[in-house]
Image (tube, grey):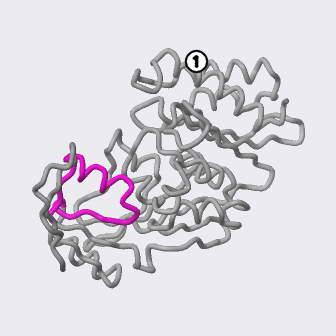
């Protein structure tokens, strides 16, 4: 274990804190050490969120565990009915993976639009989830897919839906001593279409003002059998637009039906005003872009 050096000099607003640095040799080693320090320890993977918060004085930890070389936390596997992605898999790997493009195409699209190339080369899917930002780009497609997360600790393993894991801004159901090991994402069913949309203040490298993911399956008569819509950056956490989904099921994909569903989705959002958009502006964006999302899913041009 190495101790990061103190740097007491003032570097603008940066706050330099002292912590121990440990690079566990295996997942078992990580879990054993993490169980000793509990909430005073933190997982360091991409570091794109954690290191910024430490430097800004928003987080302080006694031990940082570098998990970048733990093989049990890496990789993308096609398991047939689902795709398993290790929590420390880089975002750029997900964006470029042929398995993800084939089995969960809207996750590939979301990964490709997350941040800059430099961020995608460092950031991990586990970090994007655990940071619990309402605007996290990978969360809407994962939630829309019905993804489950796998957690492991000295007390055993847990598996729960991502929708239940996310609690609010910066808040998840992860417990002291637990490690997010992998995400299991159901493969898109035959005949089901999916799509991801992101709206930012500029075309690239922007935090989402609104992001949306959706999937839809119609029967041979053009009636909607299955539909899911997930809204991001417009509530304390990404949320299913369940009333809009209920409205759509059993209906044809007419323009009137899609526009009404988009209005319902807008009423389900709980946006706030911030430096990127106003509350009313976000609500209008939800309605407009949900309609566009449904157009794509239903192939209406």
Q: SS of the residue at dot 1? A: helix
Identified at 52% across, 48% down, the residue is: 115
| 196 over 242 or under it: above or below | below
Question: Taking 143 as reference, is 50 left or right?
Answer: left
Quarter residue 289 falls in: top right
Q: Residue 196 placed where, x, y %?
A: 65, 42
Image coordinates for residue 43, horizontal then vertical, percent? 30, 65
Quadrant, the C terminus: top right
Q: Residue at x 58, y 27 (%)?
A: 243
Q: Specify whether residue 56 is painted magenta.
A: yes
Examine the rendered structure and indicate whether residue 197 appears above or below residue 74: above
Quadrant for the N terminus, please.
bottom left
Is 136 or 158 nearer to us in this picture?
136
Is residue 125 located in the magenta-colored stretch of the structure?
A: no
Relative image position of residue 28 (x, y in whole percent): 31, 81
Residue that extends furthest to the top in the rendered view of this protein? 280
Q: Nearer the viewer, residue 116 or 166?
A: 116
Q: Nearer the viewer, residue 282 or 78?
A: 282
Q: Nearer the viewer, residue 268 or 67?
A: 67
Q: Name the residue: 19% across, 47% down.
A: 57
Of all residues, the one furthest to the right in this rendering is 221
Range of residues picked out in magenta: 39-62
Counting from the top left corner in percent of width and height, residue 261 is at 67, 23
Vertical position of residue 60 compared to residue 202: above or below: below
| Residue at the disc numbered 1 | 284
Crowdedness near tag 1: few (<14), some (14–19) or many (≥20) residues, C-alpha within 10 Å: some
How many numbered markers are drawn?
A: 1
**Name of the residue lying farthest toward the bottom:** 25
């Amino acid at each position: 274990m190495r101790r990061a050096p103190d740097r007491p000099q003032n570097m603008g607003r940066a706050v330099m804190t002292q912590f121990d640095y440990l690079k566990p040799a295996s997942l078992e080693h990580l879990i054993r050490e993490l169980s000793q320090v509990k909430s005073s320890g933190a997982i360091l993977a991409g570091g794109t969120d954690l290191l910024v918060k430490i430097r800004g004085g928003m987080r302080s930890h006694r031990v940082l565990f570098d998990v970048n070389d733990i093989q049990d936390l890496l990789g993308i596997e096609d398991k047939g009915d689902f795709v398993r992605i290790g929590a420390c898999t880089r975002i750029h790997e997900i964006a470029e993976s042929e398995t993800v493009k084939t089995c969960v195409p809207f996750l590939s699209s979301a990964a490709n639009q997350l941040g800059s190339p430099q961020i995608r080369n460092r950031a991990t899917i586990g970090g994007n989830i655990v940071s619990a930002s309402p605007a996290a780009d990978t969360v809407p497609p994962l939630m829309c897919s019905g993804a489950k997360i796998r957690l492991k600790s000295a007390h055993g393993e847990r598996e729960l839906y991502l929708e239940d894991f996310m609690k609010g801004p910066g808040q998840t159901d992860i417990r002291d001593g637990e490690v997010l090991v992998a995400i299991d994402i159901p493969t898109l069913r035959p005949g089901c279409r999916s799509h991801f949309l992101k709206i930012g203040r500029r075309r690239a490298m922007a935090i989402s003002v609104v992001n949306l993911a959706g999937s839809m399956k119609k029967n041979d008569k053009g009636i909607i059998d299955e539909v899911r819509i997930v809204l991001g950056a417009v509530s304390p956490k990404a949320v299913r637009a369940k009333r809009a989904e209920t409205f759509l099921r059993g209906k044809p994909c007419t323009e009137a039906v899609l526009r009404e569903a988009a209005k319902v989705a807008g009423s389900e959002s709980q946006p706030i005003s911030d430096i990127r958009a106003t509350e009313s502006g976000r609500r209008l964006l939800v309605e407009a872009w949900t309609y566009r999302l449904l157009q794509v899913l239903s192939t209406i041009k």
